[in-house]
Amino acid sequence: MADVVATHETIVVVGGGISGMTAAVEAAETGKNVILLERTPSLGGRVNQLYKYFPKLCHPTCGMEINLRRLRANKRIKVLTLAEVTKVEGHAGDYKISVTLHPRYVNDHCTACGACGEAVSAEIPNPFNYGMSRMKAAYLPSLMAYPQRYVIDPSILGTPDAEKARDACKYGAVDLDMKAEVITLSAGAVVWATGWRPYDAGKIQPYGYDRFDNVITSVEFERLSDPRGPTGGRIVRPSDGKEAKNVAFIQCAGSRDRNHLKHCSRICCMASLKQTTYMRERFGDEAQSTVYYIDIRAIDRFEDFYQKVQADSTVRFVKSKVANITEDEATGDVILHGVDTEGYHRYDNRHDLCVLAIGMEPSVNIKAIADVAVDASGFIEMGATDGGLFGAGCAANALDVNRSVQSATASVLRAVQVVNRVAKAEG
């Protein structure tokens, strides 16, 4: 990548989700040169996979579009996708970042016309929909993908499909000979904004996520509800396609549990409250949403939203840690078992579908890549060993979108101070 120029006055941002994009844009708007690295084929992260934000229930496309516009307009930002950081060495003012650039098999001549996708027949699971749908092996990651360039999945290399994709492109954009490349970047400061991953629900054995089709996670339900999602916005059961009008939402699925994640993941309560509004939106008065909770954590301005959901006649709250889930094999219904702690009576409640409000954990084990301080959950702590590598967003803590943006801004301010000190010392 001869066109990538990085110096000790450059700020490298690792992760192209909402936190990383915010950090990159705000660092560049202070006059700093920025290299933004994203491991997947496009920017946007998990926010791009949301149907709506809470509490205003607006669509993420709005905020994402503004960030993308700012990013595209700023010539100080260089974006590298399919870029995986393997090592960060050095100290504040002088970092060396080892990066593997994985091949897209599509070059920058791509116009996103879609001819390659139409030409191939092979299909692969769609990660944007958490594998709930399939897509062509030549694909655009999402409608809002940036860069707007197709990707050829390596699974079809050496097959007739790959040749069809290349032959279909009249711009010469499909390059099947692309190879992985390793580069080393220099930087004065690094902002680590690699985001979060959903906790593996299969580890919560009493809930049967890996055994019962009609137990899904909150991130999967988000995609089900989205009109751009795998079902066109129809809220249906994976087992049989039946409309799921009676849905259970289990809070703290993996969070606040010494056997799984000890921390509170913060977004889960509000995410489930938001998703009950999807039920109301889809089914009206026929919707039945039951929220099983330990306690509802709706802080600051979110309390009003919580009260609004409480007032909805289609939503019921059960104060209980669900003990286990079984399945009625004849109907596919899931049956939740536990004790309602308000009255202390046992229940065996039947639902069409169960949604696990799954916890969040850091998406990357940064200790294997860089020498930084992390807490017991793996989140980057303030006061890293040398002061030049900063965690932002969900790399630093379990945060919602609003707080992730605030965290990114704070981290950039610290990174800019480091770079300014280096420049002053050398000036």
Image (cartoon, rainbow, N blue to C red):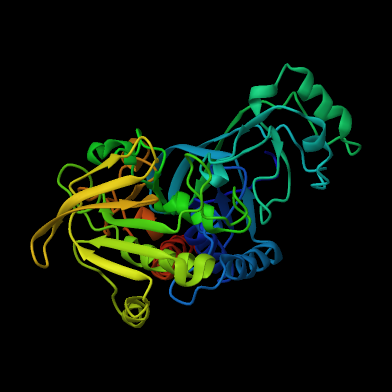
Regarding residue 358, the answer to whether it shows in the image is: no
**How far from the left and from the top, in percent, is residue 366?**
35, 42
Task: Determine the image quadrant of residue 81.
Answer: top right
From this view, report whether residue 312 is shown above or below residue 352. Answer: below
From this view, report whether residue 241 is shown above or below residue 283. Answer: above
In front: 405, or 206?
Answer: 206
**How far from the left and from the top, in percent, is residue 141?**
65, 45
Task: Determine the image quadrant of residue 151.
Answer: top right
In front: 389, or 61?
Answer: 61
**How far from the left and from the top, in percent, is residue 128?**
56, 46
**How far from the left and from the top, in percent, is residue 221?**
46, 53
Left/right placement of residue 124 relative to residue 174 reads: left
Q: Residue at x 63, y 51 (%)?
A: 79
Left/right placement of residue 205 relative to residue 392 reads: left
Regarding residue 42, the answer to whether it shows in the image is: yes
> Where the N terminus falls, by quadrant?
top right
Q: Residue at x 12, y 67 (%)?
A: 342
In front: 89, or 259?
Answer: 259
In front: 99, or 259?
Answer: 259
Q: Residue at x 57, y 52 (%)?
A: 35
